[in-house]
Amino acid sequence: MAGGVPALRSIAAAAEPGVGGLGALAAAVFYVVANSVPMLGVTVVGREASTTVLGGALHLWQSGQEMVALLVLFTAVVAPAMQIVLTLAIVLGARRQPAPDGPGRCCAITGPRSPGA
């Protein structure tokens, strides 16, 4: 994986200092807020109910729609969390001298990105 490290260094060098890390930290903060604030609301016959995305997935599971519940859970909770964690690993790893091989593997998982994207 040593061939991937120079490419990782060039990506880190081209980015503005601290931008990637701040973006990933902001994403983590918004992720926590988005998954803790009730976002799903239903009004039926004058009764209101609201829940979080996790609560909606749990309700779907309990009502027998396991596949839909898993899709909601993966696309709204698991995949964004993995993306944030991998982005933080890449940014923090690329800032170390010498850059370790681990962030290069994370780049292979998340795919190529242009600096500042």
Image: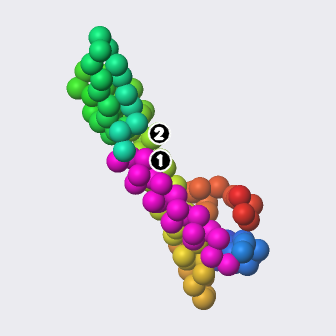
Residue 12, above or below 65: below
> Is residue 37 shown in magenta?
no
Whether residue 82 is visible to the viewer of this picture, yes or no, is: no
Q: Residue at x 41, y 52 (%)?
A: 33
Q: Quadrant of residue 17?
A: bottom right
Query: Quadrant where the N terminus lies?
Result: bottom right
Residue located farthest toward the top when viewing the structure as drawn: 45
Q: Which residue is mark 1?
A: 79
Front residue of 98/69: it is 69
Can you give x and y, in whole percent of width and height, for residue 54 in the image?
33, 39
Tell me the magenta residue range. 17-36
> Is residue 21 shown in magenta?
yes
Q: CA distance from mark 1 to mark 2?
A: 6 Å
Whether residue 95 is visible to the viewer of this picture, yes or no, is: yes
Mark 2 surroundings within 10 Å by alpha-carbon count, few (fewer than 14), some (14 through 19), many (20 or more): few
Q: Amino acid at mark 1?
A: Ala
Q: Residue at x 57, y 69 (%)?
A: 22
Local secondary structure at mark 1: helix
Q: Which residue is mark 2?
A: 75
Can you give x and y, in whole percent of width and height, for residue 85 in the image?
47, 62
Q: Residue at x 60, y 81 (%)?
A: 95
Q: Are marks 1 and 2 in contact (CB under 8 Å)?
A: yes
Q: Amino acid at mark 2?
A: Thr
Can you give x and y, in whole percent of width and height, for residue 29 in the image?
45, 59
- Horizontally, residue 97 falls left or right of residue 66, namely right
Q: Tell me how many marks there are.
A: 2
Front residue of 77/23: it is 23
Residue located farthest toward the left when viewing the structure as drawn: 62
